[in-house]
Image (cartoon, rainbow, N blue to C red):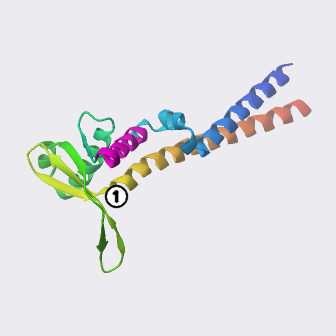
C-alpha cells in the first residue's frame, strides 16, 4: 500500500513537471508564465511597447525603472560610481530609425534618448536595450528549465529506487 502511494505521488509530481515544462517552453503564448518567472521582463516589455506607440515614457510608467536600470548599468562602465550615484534618468523618448554604416556591418539604428536628473541628455541604441531586456527573459527561462530538469532527474531516481525496493 505504501509503495502504491509513493508511486502515485511520483506520478503526480511527474505530471506537474511535464505541464510546467510545457508552459515554460510555450511561455510566449502564456503571459502568466512570465508573470511568475520574470515579472521584470513583463514590465520592461510593456514599457518598450508604450515607447513604440507613444515614443516617450517617464518615471511613472510601468517598466521605466527596469530600462533605466539597464542604461545606468551601462553608464557605470564608463563613469565613476560617484557620478552615477548623483544622477537618475527622468525621461526617455524614441527617435526615428535610420541606417548606420560601419566598416564591418550595416544595421538599423534607432536612438533611445534619455534625460538625466542633472539636465544632461544622451542616447543609446534602442535595439541594444531591447536585446538586454530579452536577456532578462532568457536567463530566467534557463534557470527554471534547469530546476525542472534537476527535479525530473531526482524523481526518476526516486521512482527507480521504489521499483527496485518493491521487487526485492
Give the residue furthest to the top.
1
| Mark 1 crowd level (few <14, some 14–19, many ≥20, 10 Å Cα) | some
Quarter of the figure that contains the N terminus: top right
Q: Residue at x 74, y 34 (%)?
A: 158
Which image quarter: residue 96?
Answer: bottom left
Give the residue furthest to the bottom.
103
Secondary structure beneath dot 1 equals: helix
Give the residue furthest to the left.
119
Determine which residue is flagged by label 1.
128
Give the residue furthest to the front.
53
Q: Is 32 left or right of 44, judged from the image as shown?
A: right
Which image quarter: residue 160?
Answer: top right
Residue 42 within the magenta-colored segment of the rendering: yes
Q: Is 102 left or right of 113, judged from the image as shown?
A: right
Q: Residue at x 28, y 44 (%)?
A: 69
Name the chief secondary structure element in magenta: helix
Instruction: State the extent of the magenta-drawn residues as a range.
Output: 41-54
Q: Nearer the viewer, residue 42 or 2?
A: 42
Which image quarter: residue 4?
Answer: top right
Coordinates of residue 63 in the picture (x, y in percent):
33, 38
Residue 72 within the magenta-colored segment of the rendering: no
Amino acid at each position: 500500500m505504501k509503495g502504491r502511494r509513493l508511486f502515485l505521488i511520483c506520478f503526480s509530481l511527474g505530471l506537474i513537471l511535464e505541464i510546467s515544462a510545457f508552459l515554460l517552453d510555450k511561455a510566449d503564448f502564456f503571459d502568466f508564465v512570465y508573470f511568475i518567472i520574470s515579472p521584470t521582463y513583463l514590465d520592461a516589455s510593456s514599457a518598450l511597447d508604450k515607447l513604440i506607440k507613444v515614443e516617450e515614457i517617464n518615471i511613472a510608467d510601468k517598466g521605466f525603472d527596469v530600462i533605466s536600470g539597464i542604461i545606468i548599468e551601462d553608464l557605470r562602465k564608463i563613469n565613476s560610481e560617484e557620478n552615477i550615484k548623483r544622477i537618475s534618468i527622468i525621461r526617455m523618448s524614441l527617435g526615428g530609425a535610420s541606417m548606420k554604416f560601419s566598416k564591418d556591418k550595416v544595421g538599423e539604428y534607432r536612438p533611445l534618448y534619455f534625460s538625466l536628473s542633472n539636465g544632461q541628455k544622451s542616447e543609446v541604441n534602442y535595439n541594444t536595450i531591447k536585446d538586454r531586456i530579452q536577456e532578462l527573459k532568457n536567463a530566467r527561462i534557463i534557470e527554471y528549465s534547469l530546476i525542472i530538469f534537476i527535479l525530473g532527474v531526482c524523481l526518476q531516481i526516486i521512482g527507480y529506487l521504489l521499483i527496485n525496493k518493491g521487487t526485492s
